[in-house]
Image (cartoon, rainbow, N blue to C red):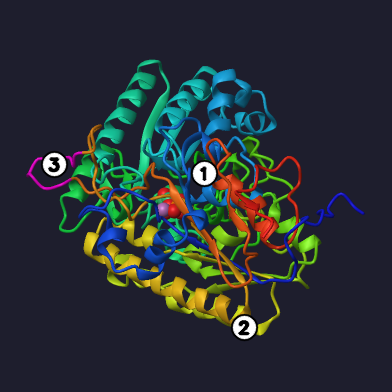
Amino acid sequence: ASSWTLPDHPKLPKGKPVAVVVLDGWGEANPDQYNCIHVAQTPVMDSLKNGAPEKWRLVKAHGTAVGLPSDDDMGNSEVGHNALGAGRIFAQGAKLVDQALASGKIYDGDGFNYIKESFENGTLHLIGLLSDGGVHSRLDQLQLLLKGVSERGAKKIRVHILTDGRDVLDGSSVGFVETLENDLLELRGKGIDAQIASGGGRMYVTMDRYENDWDVVKRGWDAQVLGEAPYKFKSALEAVKTLRAQPNANDQYLPPFVIVDDSGKAVGPVLDGDAVVTINFRADRMVMLAKALEYADFNNFDRVRVPKIRYAGMLQYDGELKLPSRYLVSPPEIDRTSGEYLVKNGIRTFACSETVKFGHVTFFWNGNRSGYFDETKEEYVEVPSDSGITFNVAPKMKALQIAEKARDALLSGKFDQVRVNLPNGDMVGHTGDIEATVVACKAADEAVKIILNAVEQVGGIYLVTADHGNAEDMVKRNKSGKPLLDKNGGIQILTSHTLQPVPVAIGGPGLHPGVKFRNDIQIPGLANVAATVMNLHGFEAPADYEQTLIEVADN
Ligand code: 3PG
Ligand code: CO
């Protein structure tokens, strides 16, 4: 037997199809008017929760349980799906960058030495998300990096900011820009020519994912690299304040702008001989820009001018593509994932979501690895997402289509595991539109119903869970849980994820009648799910996996 062979489970049979359903952004919280899952009609998820108590439970989905620096860190899809798929807790990008900055190791590596070559005669460009959300990037890491590179010879620095409002409150961009401007002013006081050069809202400029809409990346390229944008300002603070004052504007969708000097010339296009660092540690929304910056062969949009640069990512974003080839901090080595084990043990696997979450159930699930482990045993299906809209205008998204694909995959008899991500609670939750999020939750629940019906028909097993909270709490609260008000007396809408736990429910006609959740695991989290799923397929998990959530009574 190779080291990939999983031992048989002593009590659980093989051969039962298993549906693994991940509801994105679906946490458990007090039932009130800001809990969209509670407000929505969700009879299927309700029945799981109110059914047998030994088949439904909560697990942690944030903080140290998913490899984030502290328990004040909300969960997110990258770390959530990594934990679900890998069955172990890895120190994640946020933490690894913290450590590399604290120890100074970030400045000793190949990546830093590579970009440093440009410090003498070129400009160092830092491109990334400007907030303290801790999901894709963190302001304090950018601050430390600015300090570090200045002390190590960078003479001219240009920062290309992407405003957030999605992992943090809308409107907070102004404060983050002020903080950054102050830091850059201080650097200028030390003789370093440091400025913000361009900007735009993350969802409209640069940070698309899974190739949903290349125009987003192109808008960023034009501003950051070419120095061209529809809006020109003398300062970033003025830019953000002015653009936010336009009707319906918000941080997530600010249009692209460039900063110009007194003669109207962009202060920071990327030129031959420059260095570029994309400062986000999280992969999904940096991969497309990384391709544009790194690939000689590229035709997703017309780059017009391709400067000869030294480019490094904060991390390597895709281990399989080795993208980018240079990076400042090594990513977590998420190896031996459950997906790889199961495929190598003969489990024919089907995975599906719509574009905006497709990589979550494939790439993230498989440890930030793109592609198949074994093409003959796997099929990954992407349902095209609507692009160019905010999902509150179409909150049902493609939940129905995803569920139908899963249903068909189960009924086909061709797959042992059918895995989906249902994006609604998260993607609509991020818009901050409470009414639309209620519609979204209902749609996700209806999709679960279709999948559970198919599980019923094929005599299979289901495991329904979520990657982190979002839709269950749409208001910013004080420490005692009371909703916070804004200046005008309205509630402060919470567009971000939460710190809430998420459900895990198991069942289906194929589930051995003696299976129940254990109650001897101290604080279970998402990483305990992988061993559980392996058990449901009739295997024991590898010894170093986090423990299974289930046990089997004798009859
Ligand atoms: C996003 O990228 O959309 C948010 O920052 C995080 O959401 P996700 O972790 O659910 O993808
Ligand atoms: Co989200």
Residue 137 position, x and y percent, is: 46, 39
Give the Cα distance between marks 2 and 1.
55 Å
Which residue in the rendered view is the most extreme toward the left? 488
Residue 182 in the image: above or below residue 28: above
Q: Sequence order check: which comes first, mark 2 or mark 1?
A: 1
Residue 324 visible in the current orientation: yes
Which residues are the magenta region?
482-491
Q: Residue at x 73, y 50 (%)?
A: 541
Q: Whole-percent x and y of residue 431? A: 29, 58
Answer few, some or many: residues within 10 Å of disc 2's Cα (few below 14, many 20 plus, some between 14 and 19): some
**Residues tagged 3 and 2 counted as in contact (Cβ below 8 A):** no
Q: Is residue 255 left or right of residue 73?
A: left
Q: What amino acid is labelled 3 in the image? A: Leu
Using the numbered discs, state the Cα–Cα distance from disc 3 to disc 2 in whole angstroms: 50 Å
Say which element carries label 2.
Answer: helix
Displayed quadrant of residue 17: bottom right
Q: Which residue is mark 1?
A: 271
Question: In which quadrant of the rendered view does residue 333 lie?
Answer: top right
Q: Secondary structure at mark 1?
A: loop
**Image coordinates for residue 498, horizontal then vertical, percent:** 36, 45
Residue position marked by numbered label 2 in the rendering = 411
Magenta span has 529? no
The x, y position of residue 363, in whole percent, is 61, 57
Q: Is residue 488 on the magenta stretch? A: yes
Residue 398 can be seen, yes or no: no
The disc labelled 2 sits on which kind of residue?
Leu
Give the residue pinned by disc 3: 485
Judge left or right: residue 153 versus residue 248: right
Please, what is the three-letter code of the amino acid marked with disc 1? Answer: Leu
Q: Nearer the viewer, mark 2 or mark 1?
A: 2
Q: What secondary structure prevails in the magenta region?
A: loop
In whole angstroms, how far apart are the C-alphas of marks 1 and 3? 46 Å
